[in-house]
Amino acid sequence: MVAALIVATVLTAVMMFGWSSVLNFEVERLDDRLCMEARRIAGPPLRPDRMASLEADMMLKLRLDSAEQLMLRFEPTDGGAGLQSSNWDSGVRVDALNWKPAGGTYAHGICSLASYAAHGSRWRAALFTDQGGRGFVAADLAATKAELQGAVRRALTIVIPLALALSALGAWLLSSLTMRPVNRLRDAMKGMSQTALDQRLPTRGEDLEFQELIGAYNTMLARLEASFRQASRFSSDAAHELRTPLTVLRGRIEQAVNKSNGLAIQSDLTDLLDEVSRLSDITRKLLLLSQADAGRLALNITRVDLAELLDDLVSDAQMLVAEQKLSGAVERNLVAECDEVLVRQLFNNLVSNAVSYSLPGGWIEVVGRRLPPGIEVTFANATHPIPAADRAHFFDRFYRGDPAHNRSVEGSGLGLSLAREIARAHGGDLTLEPSAPNEVRLRLWLPVAQAAQG
């Protein structure tokens, strides 16, 4: 819109300047013709019977449309009878006009030029003086302007569309060339992921302003890469360091449980053992998440029947639910190429999440099917109403939602995050689908590249 306004403003200014220049040029040409015609009638004495043919001839040469646009007058030097055209305005006082010398030179006389108003329009007049008398010729400038306007209109019907087309093409080419570095930067930002933080944009061949912009982007990316790698390395190192002492602690507590005789001591040790197991589970999940963040989650790809995995998990879950209705609708022969251990953990996390957060007397549903792009598995359950703000943080790590509803539910807040990372590591995704506030519906999708046609 701004570009079009600028083009229109510039075009208008050019047209106004061009109109003024062309009009001045046409007036100068008209002055030359007026001087020639005034010299013509100032020469030999004119015969009255030749006045009509003289007017017609001058109208043709001066490009006038009618006799009302022409004034002629001849005044002899000897004081004899002069001649004037039928359209002569008696209010015109020849000697009172502001005469200025014409630009050209003439051998037998002098030509002067002047402008005046008559019959409601502007006129241009030439007065040629020689030994025989004075010749006066005036033409209505309206005729010259009308002729010029017609020519301009005919030209503008071609020039304006062509100018607009060329302006639009030029603006498009200029914007394309100008925005190319910005588009490259935009595409790089869109393609930026945690596994591609080491990529940098070259600055060679770019304008100075874009070199500074790309340099700032590369600097920002380097800082992000350093911070991300440091955080990922810390999580991985911490998980590695915690595994050994937790394993030792778990073994010692198990030994203490076996050796103790008191029921109260055994109960306390069993509670400690459960907490150690929970810490071990969190540590294992953190290690997997740190590997996924760094793009180093190792996959042992084999052909796995997802339908059998889902049947086993649904059967196990049937024994855990007492007040909920659990149903499964899984198509047969859902064979996929994936890491069986990780996908089993993914399914287990989603089924456990549905069982843990389902309402008493509610329902749980697991649906698996093959679609043209791949395999889709949906996990849904009834739950307490979940606000949209909590749904936006569904996959955030350590996020537990409303404590009033989750106080009695065991978990670390890492299950859904890990499940999504496992899905993405296989080229798929795990998403929270739109649903009613009192319902949760998670959709797992594995692309056709990972799904084997059974």
Image (tube, helix red, strand yellow):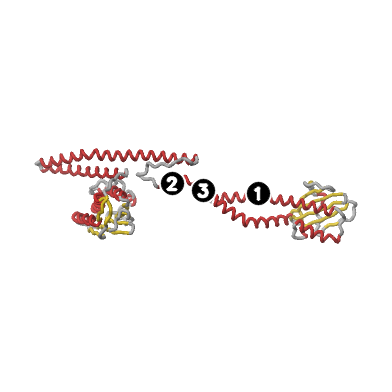
Q: Nearer the viewer, mark 1 or mark 3?
A: 3
Label 1 belongs to which residue? 17
Residue 401 visible in the snapshot: no
> Which quadrant of the structure image shows residue 223?
top left
Q: CA distance from mark 3 to mark 2?
A: 15 Å
Q: Return the x and y of residue 141 as percentages of the image width and height.
A: 73, 54
Q: 10 Å neighbourhood of mark 1: few (<14), some, or many (≥20)?
A: few
* Badge 3 amino acid: Ser
What secondary structure is found at the residue carrying circle 2?
Answer: helix
Residue 278 visible in the snapshot: yes
Report the disc number at residue 175: 3
Please name whichever residue, 213 or 117, is drawn nearer the observer in this view of the structure. Answer: 213
Q: 10 Å neighbourhood of mark 3: few (<14), some, or many (≥20)?
A: few
Report the disc number at residue 186: 2
Q: Return the x and y of residue 257 as percentages of the image width and height.
A: 12, 42
What secondary structure is found at the residue carrying circle 1?
Answer: helix
* Badge 2 amino acid: Arg
Q: 10 Å neighbourhood of mark 2: few (<14), some, or many (≥20)?
A: few
Report the residue at 21% width, 39% height from top.
Answer: 244
Report the residue at 20% width, 44% height from top.
Answer: 277
